[in-house]
Amino acid sequence: MTVPNRSSTFWWLYVSVLVGAALFIAHTFIGILVLGVSGYYATRPISNRFETVTGSKWRAAGLTALTVLIPVLVLALYAGIRILLQVKQQFDESVFSLLVSRVLGLDVEESSPAALLRNPPSLDRLTDLLSGEALQQGLQVLDLVSGTILLLSLAVTLSYALLVYDEALSSAFAKLVGGREETVFAYALTVDTDLESIFFGNLLFVLFMSVVATTAYTITNLVAPPEMQIPMAFTLGVLTGLTSLIPIVVSKVVYIPIVAYLAVQAGGRQFVFLVALPVVYSIVLDILPQSLVQPYISGRQLNPIVLLFAYILGPILFGWYGFFLLPIIFVLMLEVIRIALPELLHGEPLGPEPGLAEETGADAEEMQEDDADTATSDTDGTSTTRG
């Protein structure tokens, strides 16, 4: 009977504790982790192209962050400002007055900057503010805003770090599992390729649909009567691009409310225009992009029905980050079923080739060969990039 090695037992227990700690940290900051990984896969092909020009992963990752990741945050900020300005225009009230009236408890007429200078809040009112419910609401809003900025900043930083160190992490993982010829490494490569196909394809499709939708809404404003103008055409165009990621649902959730808003504005007039507009939108923003463009650039290696369930059920199961998390989980499950499960059920040795649904997902053996060629080229001193 073999006596267990005390040193090995200690190390396995120690590693188990650290794995548990890592899982706890990942669960606590799952939003940052998921956003960072999604941003990495969405921008990796772009970073690889930059690397062929600059010859440095650091510079390529920095350029990717400056030209893709950070502009997304700026665009979100711009959209938020536009929404606030639209609220001001619709209700004919100062945004500053609205905010001050909510926080200080003043009437709208008393909360303009000039009124506050003429008649500042009394000491009693300020004391009530510092100890009352209004302060708690203000702190909650501040906490929400600062937390969102921190989350997005850390997610961008994580994406940048992965863009810089992805090849080093790949080499370390290959050594950990026993080599690039092992089945587990082939599984990791197929998951890696599928995730890039999904998230990079999503980025391209969002950009494409944002441009198309913004153009469509701008043209609508050019030909529509003055009383039927679409507000915030650019912001709604970006929102249309984002919603177009969800198969079948696509941009209907944006352009149908737009048509309903224009119908209310028309007040029963322009009947022909209101009937033609949703038909044009459904063709330009729905049918043509979904049938001609998306199959070539978004999730090309996965069944769109799988992505449909992932995108719809993800936020229901996990919250906002489920939109990114559940597609990752589905890919992990799909590749296990394709590569490992048939052999495990039949008691056969595991191999890199898929035993089921060969037409779905990435080709594991081809991925291994490409990765082996890349590793050989890197060893010889030749600069190569993945993706």
Image: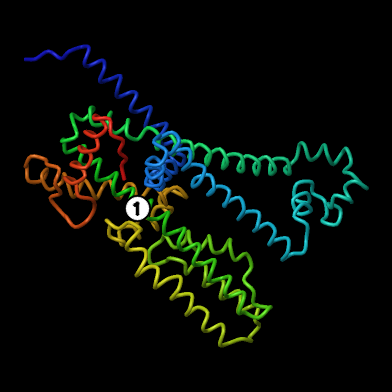
Circle 1 is placed at which residue position?
Answer: 198
SS state under label 1? helix
Q: Residue at x 72, y 43 (%)?
A: 133
Q: Residue at x 36, y 63 (%)?
A: 294
Q: Is residue 121 left or right of residue 181?
A: right
What is the total number of numbered labels drawn onto the structure image?
Answer: 1
Q: Is residue 306 left or right of residue 373?
A: right
Front residue of this view, candidates 97 and 285:
285
Residue extending farthest to the right is: 118
Q: Position of residue 172 (x, y in %)?
A: 28, 28
Q: Quadrant of the C terminus?
A: top left
Q: Position of residue 35 (x, y in %)?
A: 44, 44
Q: Is residue 202 above or below residue 345?
A: below
Q: Residue at x 24, y 34 (%)?
A: 377
Q: Is residue 196 left or right of residue 258?
A: left
Q: How are the residues colored?
A: rainbow
Q: Position of residue 115 (x, y in %)?
A: 89, 51
Front residue of this view, candidates 76 and 263:
76
Looking at the rendered structure, the kind of residue marked 1 is Ile
